[in-house]
Image: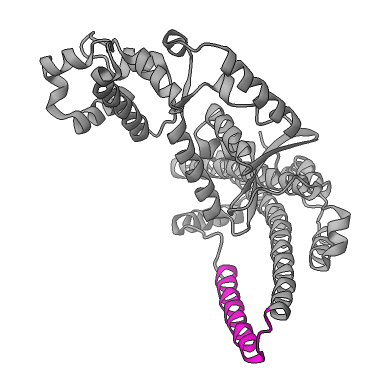
Amino acid sequence: MEESERVREVIRKQVGDDWDDEVMSRSRFKALSGQRSDWEPTYLFWRDLILSVARQLGLFIIKPSHLNNQWFNRGGLTPLSLDRVLFEMYNEGEIVLPSVDLVDPTAGRLSQVFTRLTNSMIRRSRTTTPQLLMSQDRLILTSLLKHKAVEVVKLLSECHWTSSCIVTMKRFQDICGGAYEASALLSHLSAQGKARYLSLSKGDFIEGVKVSLSASSVPSISSLDCDVLHLIWTTEKLQQQLNVIDQRCQTSRKSALACLNSGNKKVALRHVRQLKLANESRENCATLLNRVEEVLDVIASAESTKKVSEAIQIGAQAIKENKMSVEEVQHSLQEIEESIDTQKQIENALESTSLYTVDEDEEGIEEEFKKLELDIEVNSAGETEASKSAESLIDSLSNLKLVDDVLARTPAVQGTVETIRNNKTETPVLETA
């Protein structure tokens, strides 16, 4: 459904048949004049309608030109009061100007504070007019911006069980609905102390966002956060690699089956070779992806262990201060043990779940290829070519390392990472086309 049709549907639900009533439309579409008590009902009507339409469309950024030309255009008749409505909404804080009221979230903390002070002075000294608001390319609806920010944090909370999380800028933009929306939301969250921008350059320029998932402010950026961002960025790149390989496998399967059905055995053999090389590359790429995810899991577990240790220290201090009895402490420890057992059961259930299943139709195809390979000798030179085509992906993981001081303080992390590095194979993977 197009945007204009969705807007008309929202208007029909909220206004009803009054939207087509000529007398009511003539009253609503005229300019605001007189005392506030005279035009306030009309103002409230358009304000609520703008917010309702934007909410139903999932928008918190509106274009003033769309209001007249698309949203509320009634057979060529457009509201004459929209500029005044937007002006009143701006004065009441319902609307903000991105160029004045928002700061660049990628700037440093001191730069953001200075920009806010400067913008505040500019706003007080400059007279904002209805015409100025209508000439803006974009306006931000404050209430919907705050609502969207809560939704983004909630969505991230469902994917992470820690008090804060780090995501790549691409992932954050996908969640927010676009680059401009992500910038506005990041600016708002940064002003609230709930998010921080971070970046690093390791061959590629990598951008990310650290978001607080609890009531407390987001912690400052550490070197470990940059390493975690690098690891998360690598997992996304490896996943993209897997998607490309899967597409090649699918194409090779279809081509091989078509050639087998047509009796062209020679061409079918060529597609089988390509499929075999792609499958080998997929296995190696998936192995690398699992290794990186293991490191991320170890870091998350270490963070959880650190918080548990801090909680125990706080609990011990509370016992001393409140003079708790031995029975009360024993009861609390029993509850903790039950929680740990429940967590272990959940972890075991997750570990026992298969991450990859083979479709029954694909198994049948593989059997056909095996029969075909019994009759035709596969050229070994093709396998050697695959070995040369993917050395760079193995090297990408070898350059990833955690911060030494963090590893030194967390033996579990250090041991797991060292095991992963020692077990790294020389097997090649297929580079993304």
Horizontally, residue 345 falls left or right of residue 53, namely right
User: What colouring does the structure picture have?
Assistant: one colour
In this rendering, the answer to whether 323 lies above or below 37 is below
Q: Position of residue 252 (x, y in %)?
A: 55, 42
**Quarter of the rendering occupied by the C terminus:** top right
In the image, residue 321 sits, relative to residue 427, either above or below, namely below
- Name the side, left or right, on which 268 lies relative to 296: left
Measuring 83% from the left and 51% from the top, which residue is drawn there? 401
Tell me which residue sits at (26%, 25%) in the image.
Answer: 45
User: Which region of the structure is painted magenta?
Assistant: 322-351
Q: Position of residue 13 (x, y in %)?
A: 20, 33
User: Magenta span has 189?
Assistant: no
Res. 274 visible in picture: no
Dominant secondary structure (helix, strand or loop) of the stretch shown in magenta: helix
| 282 or 319: nearer the viewer | 319
Q: Position of residue 30 (x, y in %)?
A: 23, 10
Vertical order, 407 against 92 (above or below): below
> Can residue 424 be seen by looking at this rendering?
yes
Q: Quadrant of the N terminus?
A: top left
Decide whether residue 340 is among the magenta residues. Answer: yes
Rendered location of residue 228, percent (x, y): 73, 49
Q: How many marks?
A: 0
Displayed quadrant of residue 311: bottom right
In the picture, measured across the screen, residue 347 lies left or right of residue 152, that is: right
Q: Nearer the viewer, residue 256 or 35?
A: 35
What residue is at 57 percent from the left and 18 percent from the top? 123
Q: Is residue 197 left or right of residue 398?
A: left
